[in-house]
Image: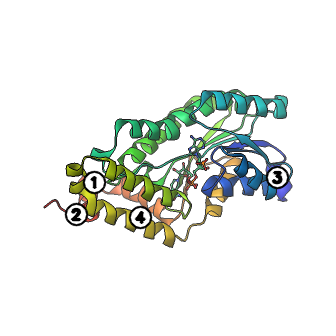
Amino acid sequence: MSEQLAGQGRAVVVSGASSGLGLACARQLDQLGFRVFAGVRRPADADALRAAASPRLHPIMLDVTSEESIAQALALVTAEVGDRGVWGLINNAGICVSAPLECVAPEQLRQQLETNLIGHHAMIRAFLPLTRTARGRIVNVSSGLGRVASPYLGAYAASQFAKEGYSDSLRRELRPFGVHVVVVQPGAIKTPIWGKVSEVGNQTLEGAPAAVANLYRESFLRFLAGNDRRAQASATRPESFAAAVADALTARSPKSRYRVGRDSRLTSVVYRLLPDKVLDTVFTSVVGTAR
Ligand SMILES: NC(=O)c1ccc[n+]([C@@H]2O[C@H](COP(=O)([O-])OP(=O)(O)OC[C@H]3O[C@@H](n4cnc5c(N)ncnc54)[C@H](OP(=O)(O)O)[C@@H]3O)[C@@H](O)[C@H]2O)c1
């Protein structure tokens, strides 16, 4: 199949296309002949995307936590696609708050859920009429951690577990309309998110009362360093994620879940086979034992 045929000029909207997985996805879908509306939050990111893509790719300003920004993006896309609708809505924008839950302020948890869950819901509500018109597809980017919750990633896991349940309901609700809902679960992939995770993690720890932070510091810093090492060493590339999204958008009958990377596939097996008691023991080796 030629690249042009794969996308056939069909419209797709990608949130969080300024970096990492969203950027790789926007570029690959552009190369495959989709008409990509790539969501970014800074004009410089729009310029960079434009410079590295075909004239089909259209950067749009999009903050998924702002109803106003979503409404503006929707108006722009609607004006461009007319009654052809939107074939693919890729909900990729995300942040990751990693810290011991005792250190996470409620406002931080709110921000985590606001971006990774409520923001995606707001996008889906806004773009669903266009997606239904095209009998298209909604791709929700979750994580290998959407099924197994590691310590120190509770806020993030809460958002991803919620997205998994949300997506299952949505898939069953939209089936009668011929709209497919797909979850993509990447494992660890080297992107800028890991630098941000360490930065936010350190800030969160230091923002907690010293007596609380001291309880976790040693084990949490070890955890952050281990995470970073795993991400740097990961053999999975952002392009593999983009290929899974492309598959979800072009397969005649897409799967409900695409796992990207060996660790993500392993997590899905672990989740099904290992009882909580065994997993708890495994994770004790991550957090250590309190003295
Ligand atoms: N990389 C991994 O190992 C991995 C593993 C599992 C799941 N994931 C998931 O994959 C997705 C992409 O992650 P990534 O690794 O590519 O991270 P990344 O490089 O940090 O990219 C995150 C993207 O989300 C955007 N974003 C954040 N908040 C936003 C908001 N309120 N509105 C619109 N856009 C917003 C960022 O835009 P700005 O540049 O403007 O901040 C950026 O474009 C996330 O949902 C993440 O949870 C990643």
Residue 120: give x, y in percent of width and height.
57, 36
SS at circle 4: helix
Which badge, 1 or 2, comes first in the chain's sequence? 1
Label 4: few (<14), some or many (≥20) within 10 Å?
some
Measure the alpha-carbon separation of dots 1 and 4: 24 Å
Q: Amino acid at mark 4?
A: Asn
Residue 122: give x, y in percent of width and height.
58, 30
Which badge, 2 or 4, comes first in the chain's sequence? 4
SS at circle 3: loop
Q: Return the residue at label 4.
A: 227
SS at circle 2: loop
Which badge, 3 or 2, comes first in the chain's sequence? 3
Q: Residue at x 84, y 53 (%)?
A: 5
Give the position of the N terminus as an image quadrant: bottom right
The quadrant where residue 227 appears: bottom left
The quadrant where residue 37 appears: top right
Q: Amino acid at mark 2?
A: Gly
Q: Return the residue at label 3.
A: 33
Q: Return the residue at label 2.
A: 288
Which badge, 3 or 1, comes first in the chain's sequence? 3
Horizontal side of residue 118 vs 69, given as left or right: left
Measure the alpha-carbon separation of dots 1 and 2: 20 Å
Front-most of residues 114 and 136: 114
Of circles 3 and 2, which is in front? 2
| Above or below 181: residue 153 | below
Give the number of the disc on residue 275.
Answer: 1
Which badge, 3 or 4, comes first in the chain's sequence? 3
Of circles 3 and 4, which is in front? 4
Q: Amino acid at mark 3?
A: Gly
Measure the alpha-carbon separation of dots 3 and 2: 50 Å
Measure the alpha-carbon separation of dots 2 and 4: 15 Å
SS at circle 1: loop
